[in-house]
Image (spheres, rainbow, N blue to C red):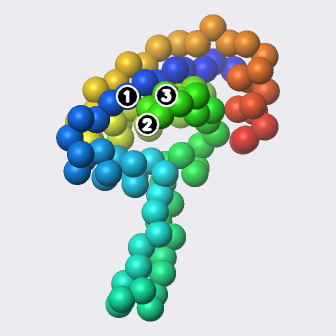
């Protein structure tokens, strides 16, 4: 399994919030909280390992979806291959 490291930063605060919601999802409320909807984010659909804020390790085949999202919200990012260790592969495989 090939892994990719992605590091990103979004300096614009409003776009940062929008990107965070698109990545992690959020709870949407309407009619003064009477109705509640769970909006799923991209990271709920793919296995990943979060190292710290803005740093992820994920499968190479899933990295394109995340990169497209980062480009849509004009975030600065770096994506590169990971010299895999058994720990990362085991964690990401378990999350599939």
Judging by the rendered image, the residue that carries numbered circle 2 is: 66
Could you tell me which residue is drawn at 58 percent across and 51 percent down?
Answer: 44
Q: Is residue 71 visible?
A: no
State which quarter of the image contains the C terminus: top right
Dot 1 or dot 2: first in sequence order is 1
In this rendering, the label closer to the viewer, 1 or 2: 1
Q: Which residue reaches farthest top?
A: 83
63 vs 49, left or right, is left
Q: Position of residue 3 (x, y in %)?
A: 60, 20
Crowd band around label 3 with a 10 angstrom C-alpha radius: few (<14), some (14–19), many (20+): some
State which quarter of the image contains the N terminus: top right
Could you tell me which residue is drawn at 64 percent across and 39 percent down?
Answer: 47
84 vs 81, left or right, is right
Cα–Cα span, label 1 and label 2: 10 Å
Q: Position of residue 91 (x, y in %)?
A: 75, 31
Crowd band around label 2 with a 10 angstrom C-alpha radius: few (<14), some (14–19), many (20+): some
Residue 70 image-quadrant placement: top left
Q: Label 1's element?
A: strand
In this rendering, the label closer to the viewer, 3 or 2: 3
Could you tell me which residue is drawn at 34 percent across and 47 percent down?
Answer: 19
Judging by the rendered image, the residue that carries numbered circle 3 is: 55
Front position in the image: 34 or 61: 34
Q: Is residue 94 visible?
A: yes
Q: Position of residue 60 (x, y in %)?
A: 55, 24
Cα–Cα span, label 3 and label 2: 12 Å
> Mark 2 and mark 3 in contact (Cβ < 8 Å)?
no
Cα–Cα span, label 3 and label 1: 7 Å
Q: Label 3's element?
A: strand
The relative height of residue 84 versus residue 94 in the rendered view (above or below) is above
Residue 57 image-quadrant placement: top right
Judging by the rendered image, the residue that carries numbered circle 1 is: 8
Could you tell me which residue is drawn at 43 percent across and 24 percent down?
Answer: 7
């Amino acid at each position: 399994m090939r892994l990719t490291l992605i590091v990103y930063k979004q300096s614009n605060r409003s776009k940062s919030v929008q990107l965070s919601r698109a990545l992690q999802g959020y709870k949407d409320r309407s009619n003064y909280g009477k109705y509640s909807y769970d909006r799923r984010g991209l990271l709920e659909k793919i296995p990943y390992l979060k190292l710290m804020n803005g740093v992820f390790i994920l499968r190479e085949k899933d990295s394109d979806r995340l990169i497209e999202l980062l480009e849509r919200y004009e975030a600065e990012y770096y994506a590169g291959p990971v010299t895999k260790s058994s720990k990362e592969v085991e964690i990401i495989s378990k999350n599939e």
